[in-house]
Image: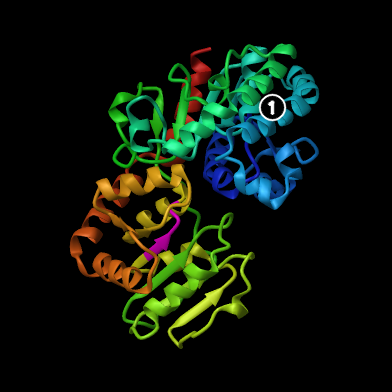
Amino acid sequence: MATIVFFCIPAHGHTNPTLNVVRELTARGHRVVYYSYDDFREKLEDAGAEFISCNGFDAQMHLTREEGAKVGSDLALSARVLVDTTLALDEPVCRQMEQLKPDCIVADSMAVWGKAVAKKLGIPYVCSTTTFAFNRESAKIMPHSLKETLSMITSMGKVNAQVKRLKQRGYPVKSILDLIGSDETVHTVVYTSPLFQPCAETFPEHFAFVGPSIRPARSEVEKTGEKLVYISMGTVNNDMLPLYQACIEAVKDTHWQVILSVGDQVDAGKLQKLSENVFVHSTVDQIAVLEKADAFLTHCGMNSASEGLYFGVPLVMLPQTSEQGGVAARVEQLGAGLRLKKTTPEVIRGTLETVMNDPSYRDNVKKIAESFRASGGAKAAADCIEDCLRAK
């Protein structure tokens, strides 16, 4: 029996894919210790992991809503959060590693403190990534704009200052790329299929493309319209009242059933001209809705896009970040959806009609869905982790 330690960030989209992997590893007789956050304790313990709380250490937990929205797009802020969290966890985690004597560390690609601890202590490391895997070839799908490139260049001084803090505490890092870059020398679990992953053939064999991990629906959704259209811009940057109003205007005189999830940043009472076919909620059981949906208007986060594709739903996409833009580009390449060119009611309605009425979109989505189901899932992920153990 091996002792395997997991590290993850406080996000459902990064935690949920690992739950079945934890179940599979514990079923094989391994001990799993999981460093995460109190909101995730119950589901992790239900999966069979021993839970250790990171709530007191993660710098991101103390950011304002405005700062939290910038993490991922502001490199200097992201570097500060990552380094603050790594150094806050440094002493207690290193001390606990001496007691646990783990055979392997599995860390989310964004939980760089797990990778940093593994490098510092010389513990075998597996990367768990819920986005696309990136190398020189696959990164071409997500080119940076001139504005993003200039922002990265101007922030490098602050970023290098954060890297220096790690060096001073004994971490063997040369640059920020040692933390956030993909390392093709380590075993990596990627929660998508070889078909959906751009340039999958350019990655080494120890990259396991295992498909998305989809939870069961928790409720039942009744389909009452000719078509069911689902609209959601995710759970983070969803303060988009003008978009929601445009969507309502676009669908108000159709025979479609429209479920609109607006999150907790929008006052649904401010939405005007609601019609009987539009149902507005702050949150829904997304899986239950997607099981019945005919089209999904989405921000194209990797988790949401994968869930829509898994259930054979063509996508209408309005990405808000470069990462979401990369997912949208891949969906378009595979003919499984369309990006919104404008957010006027006319364009929204026309794009929805196109993906629902042209059978090629649903046919192409079906191919992706089949590739997800054929990728091995939690068993393939556990195999990858055991391969790392055998390579010690």
Q: Which residue is mark 1?
A: 83
Residues rendered magenta in the picture: 296-300
Q: Residue at x 57, y 17 (%)?
A: 175
Vertical side of 73 occupied by 365: above or below:
below
Residue 298 part of the magenta-drawn span: yes
Closer to us: 186 or 233: 233
Q: Position of residue 376 (x, y in %)?
A: 38, 39
Q: Residue at x 23, y 59 (%)?
A: 361
Vertical side of 18 occupied by 100: above or below:
above
- For badge 1, the amino acid type reads Val
Q: Is residue 102 visible in this depiction of the protein?
A: no
Q: Quadrant of the N terminus?
A: top right
Judged left or right of residue 291, residue 30 is right
Q: Position of residue 40 (x, y in %)?
A: 68, 48
Which class describes the residues within 10 Å of circle 1: few (<14), some (14-19), or many (20+)?
many
Question: How many numbered marks, from 0 up?
Answer: 1
Q: Quadrant of residue 123?
A: top right
Considering the whole magenta stretch, tell me its main secondary structure: strand
